[in-house]
Amino acid sequence: MAVGVLAVIASCFSLVVGLFAVLSLINNSLVYGFNQPLLRQSVLLTIFGFLGFVLGLNGGMNSMKRRRFAMSMGCLCFLLACGVITVVDFWPIAYGGFLGSLALGLPIIVLSNSAIIFVSVSRGEFGYSR
């Protein structure tokens, strides 16, 4: 049960990252048009933020129900990758530089890594449905 809650909280942080990236995209497009210097980071973080939310929610619900071990592990690993991409790629557009990206990406990394560890430890509890 705790595994799913950790994954859902991490996916909500990923949604916040996606929303911040959308706000940065809108704000910079009003100033620079579509020639903005940080267009790649904003689009990349928007895509990974929303995909991380959807797949993290899917992985959290599957791990709460104790079904589909491979799918929940794959979704949680993608959520971990979203956290790493947030820390690495978000700092040029964050509102605090590298510390702002660390404040948004580190909770995703810690929570999804904890969820991956707990899911892999409880692998025997997952039922295999046909």
Image (spheres, rainbow, N blue to C red):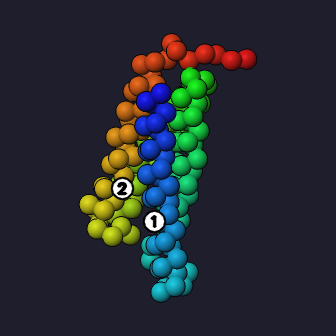
Residue at the disc numbered 2 = 104
Image label count: 2
Query: Going from the N terminus, do you reach mark 2 or mark 1 first?
Result: 1
Instruction: Give residue 34's mark.
Output: none
Whole-number angstrom distance, CA of label 2 to CA of label 1: 10 Å
Element on which disc 1 rests: helix
Q: Amino acid at mark 2?
A: Leu
x, y (%) of residue 23?
49, 72
Badges 2 and 1: C-beta atoms under 8 Å apart?
A: yes
Quarter holding the C terminus is: top right
Residue 39 appears in view? no
Image quadrant in which you'd find residue 33: bottom right
Element on which disc 2 rests: helix
Q: Amino acid at mark 1?
A: Phe
Residue furthest right as drawn: 130
Image quadrant in which you'd find residue 99: bottom left
Q: Is residue 100 left or right of residue 22?
A: left
Determine the residue positioned at 45% across, 58% down.
17
x, y (%) of residue 126?
56, 18
Query: Which residue is more in the foreground, 30 or 126?
Result: 126
Residue 57 appears in view? yes
Residue furthest top as drawn: 124
Residue at the disc numbered 1 = 20
Establish if 17 lies above or below 38. above
10 Å crowding of disc 1: few (<14), some (14-19), many (20+)? many
x, y (%) of residue 110?
34, 40
Establish if 62 lies above or below 122. below
